[in-house]
Image (cartoon, rainbow, N blue to C red):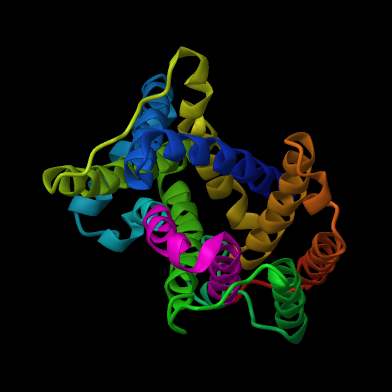
Amino acid sequence: MSGAFMVGATIAVQGLVNGALASKVGIGVLAATASFSIGLVLISIITACSRSARRGVVTVVGYLFSGLIPVWLFLGGVAGGTVVISQAVSVPVIGVTIFTTSITAGQLVGGLLVDATRVPPGGKKKITVQRVAGVLIVMAGVAASATGSASLGFAWWWPLFPFGVGTLVALQQAVNGRIRVISGSTLAATFINFAVGTSYLGLFSIALVSIGYSWTALPQTHEMWMLTGGILGVFVIGMSAFVVQGLGVLTMTIITLLGNMTASVVIDIATGHAQTALSPLTLLSLGLVTTGSLVVSTARTKPKP
């Protein structure tokens, strides 16, 4: 579980870094493409230096072209890129709080449903009363964080967009875990995810540039830390693919959320936003998420054949 917690904490730091890069560049999709590209370069170098990783990539690609595995197993990177696109489109309309609440709720529901299929590498997990109760407690915690800060004035269907993307994230974790099992290498699974995600975002960026969009500025020498998002992403994707087999998608999602919220509080305190980080609603939210995490993680569900 510590691996999933570390993933969530790293995502919080990555969000701070990528947010700063997006503000500097001016267009979120271009910033995401730069971040993914840097991550791809790093994981490519690491993969090239590992015989087992190289063998794993060749094995997976060979299975694909021979028809032994479906194409949709390679769409984990597309899901990651879609998260960035949905953020760029939705946040200006519904705000960060509602976006985060919606996408997290989607991840939880998606994790519960995906775990009940044969997609996760650890096999099926029954939808039990305890697991559903844990999800409801966590969703109450996420909703608590939005209370008092949500501003209406948008169409009712807007939150459904990030909610749907959240279900894709749950599927992403499952398919990346499957690729890891097939390849026998976490590095190979991470490389494939970054290759697909970078290609997807690259095509999207080319489309934007072709119709006149461009970056407003680039990071200066003292701002190179803004380019570390892709490096952090390598750890996030790699560790996620590694731990999902043992935990299952739902448990991993909730423990990751707990790590994310905990790190976010620390970051807010460190950046001078202690009043928000230590507010009663924030602490209530963190407490509910912790409780829900314990409820789900202690649910005993044997994988179904």
Q: Image quarter for residue 105? A: bottom right
Q: In this image, 196 relative to 248: left or right? A: left
Q: Residue at x 61, y 68 (%)?
A: 101
Q: Nearer the viewer, residue 259 or 18?
A: 18
Q: Nearer the viewer, residue 74 or 261?
A: 261
Question: Residue 200 appears at what percent x and percent y?
Answer: 26, 49
- Marks counted in the figure total 0
Q: Is residue 92 magenta-colored?
A: yes
Q: Nearer the viewer, residue 276 or 138?
A: 276
Main secondary-structure element of the magenta-colored stretch? helix
* Magenta highlight range: 83-112
Q: In this image, 252 relative to 282: left or right? A: left
Asked whether residue 70 appears in the rendered view, the answer is no
- In the image, residue 197 sits, relative to residue 141, either above or below, namely above
Q: Residue at x 78, y 73 (%)?
A: 299
Question: Residue 106 appears at what percent x and percent y?
Answer: 54, 72
Q: In this image, 281 relative to 219: left or right? A: right
Question: Residue 42 appears at what percent x and percent y?
Answer: 42, 25
Q: In this image, 145 relative to 304: left or right? A: right
Question: Residue 150 appears at what percent x and percent y?
Answer: 63, 71
Q: Is residue 62 magenta-colored?
A: no
Q: Residue at x 78, y 53 (%)?
A: 276
Q: Image quarter for residue 52? A: top left
- As drawn, the residue found furthest toward the left would be 210
Asked whether residue 224 appears in the rendered view, the answer is yes
Q: Quadrant of the C terminus?
A: bottom right
Q: Residue at x 37, y 50 (%)?
A: 77
Q: Image quarter for residue 267? A: top right
Q: Nearer the viewer, residue 304 or 147?
A: 147
- In the image, residue 226 sits, relative to residue 19, either above or below, namely above
- In the image, residue 244 sits, relative to residue 263, either above or below, namely below
